Amino acid sequence: MKGSTLLSAVALTTMLVITAGAQKSVPSTGLHEVDVRTAVIPENALSVQKIYPQNIFFPAGSAADPYIYLCANWGYPIPTGTGAGDVSLTYFNPGDFATNEYADDIILAGGSTFLPLAHPNSTACLSEVTVGIYLGAASVGDVTLRIRIYGWDGSIATTSQYPDPLNVTGDANLIWDSGATPLNYGPLQPGIYLLTVPVPNVPVSKALYISTILGGMPTTGGLIIAHGPGNVYLMPSRGDFRRKSPSARFTFVTATQGSFLINLRGKYNFVGQVDMSALSVRAQPKNPVLQWFDEDNDGVEEALRRNLVDVEVVNDSGVQPFTSRFTTYLDENGRFTLPVSGAIASIKVRRWDNGLAVAFSRPAGGWSADVCDPTTESASMTFGDVNGDGIIDDADLLSVLFGFGSGE
């Protein structure tokens, strides 16, 4: 298919097993929950394709931005029993995708720890939205998608810059719209698809509502439900989604728990590139969207641990410098992005699986203040350089000796 990237070469040729999820109790009058459904896909029939709208042109040599939000847990292999190795996933289809907007809320890193935020509120720069869908049968004509992005600054006041979409009607806080004419992905056969929407480097707020209007879906198919790990600090979204009501206000008219499989690429004001070409192929980070699957058929499930890194940031703004630590993830190209304040003197990232580290220092002119034109640095990761200082010496040997016998 033109404009598609095949992530797993095995075609979906075997009958898919569909089971209904348990119906939960109705929480209140006028509010009902939609029954989610589970698909079990035979191991030898798993097919995942990332596809773009038809007739989209990409410049030669263009590289995708790192992730600013990632839903990696959306399907898992069944570990034991007669279906061991088969893949189970959950999807959502209320039957009115093409005529209604269904929005999921996402909280990004940066800006401030707590909402509301001061104005202006440009926390990150968005360049790509990917939505995961499942088709248990062939599409009903062309699959179409319209994406709308609504901002929120944490305020419930209708006069704020980006008021909560739950409290305003219409498009008062619309940041970006893919267009009145839905994007067309063509007819699709049964399988799992990552519908990708290019976004022209749009500054976005810390809290987002990303809505979908999805056409061409069969009855046995819908939006894949996922969870975590979340934004670049691994903080998840609130785990629910909502429909735009006839009054043009986002409400919980239809509710269910979970998050849509939505991945966002973009950048904060710092982008790091970790060059791991010196490492073996099996130590390279893989596409984190496929963490549970053996994407490259080498007998090893990809596992997100190849992509996870511990981050240490040194703050030297006070009398006594201090270090903060958290965990984030690299993409399949070894890239990551972070919101970095001027007080941060250095950033060190350390692999979870082998303990190797690299460090990035604050430039002489300071970090960029423009999320769409970030500071970009590259560092090479080398076996033996355990402390990430760029050389292999006695300090690395001591680190290995003191850690001898310990596990990951």
Image (cartoon, rainbow, N blue to C red):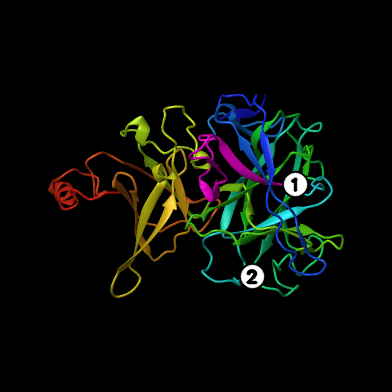
The furthest residue to the right = 246
Q: What is the quadrant of residue 252 in the picture?
A: bottom right
Q: Residues within 10 Å of mark 2 (few under 14, many from 20)?
A: some
Q: Which residue is mark 2?
A: 154
Residue 121 forms part of the magenta stretch:
no
Q: Residues within 10 Å of mark 1 (few under 14, many from 20)?
A: some
**Mark 2 residue element:** loop
- Is any part of residue 363 visible from this angle? no
| Residue occupying image coordinates x 69% and y 32% | 56
**Camera-nearest residue between 44 and 391:** 44
Residue 81 forms part of the magenta stretch:
yes
Where residue 187 appears, x then y in whole percent? 76, 29
- Placement of the N terminus among the 4 image quadrants: top right
| Residue occupying image coordinates x 38% and y 36% | 284
- Between the residue at mark 1 and the residue at mark 2, the CA separation in whole angstroms equals 29 Å
Give amino acid for label 1: Asn
Give the extent of the magenta segment: 63-92
Dots 1, 2 in contact, CB < 8 A: no
Q: Which mark is residue 93?
A: 1
Q: What is the quadrant of residue 310 in the picture?
A: bottom left
**Camera-nearest residue between 230 and 205:** 230
| Residue occupying image coordinates x 64% and y 27% | 12
| Residue occupying image coordinates x 18% and y 51% | 399
Where residue 271 appears, x then y in whole percent? 45, 49
- Specify which label sits upstream in the sequence, 1 or 2: 1
Where residue 360 appears, x then y in whole percent? 34, 51
* Vertical position of residue 252 compared to residue 275: above or below: below
* Vertical position of residue 274 compared to residue 345: above or below: above
Q: Which mark is residue 286?
A: none
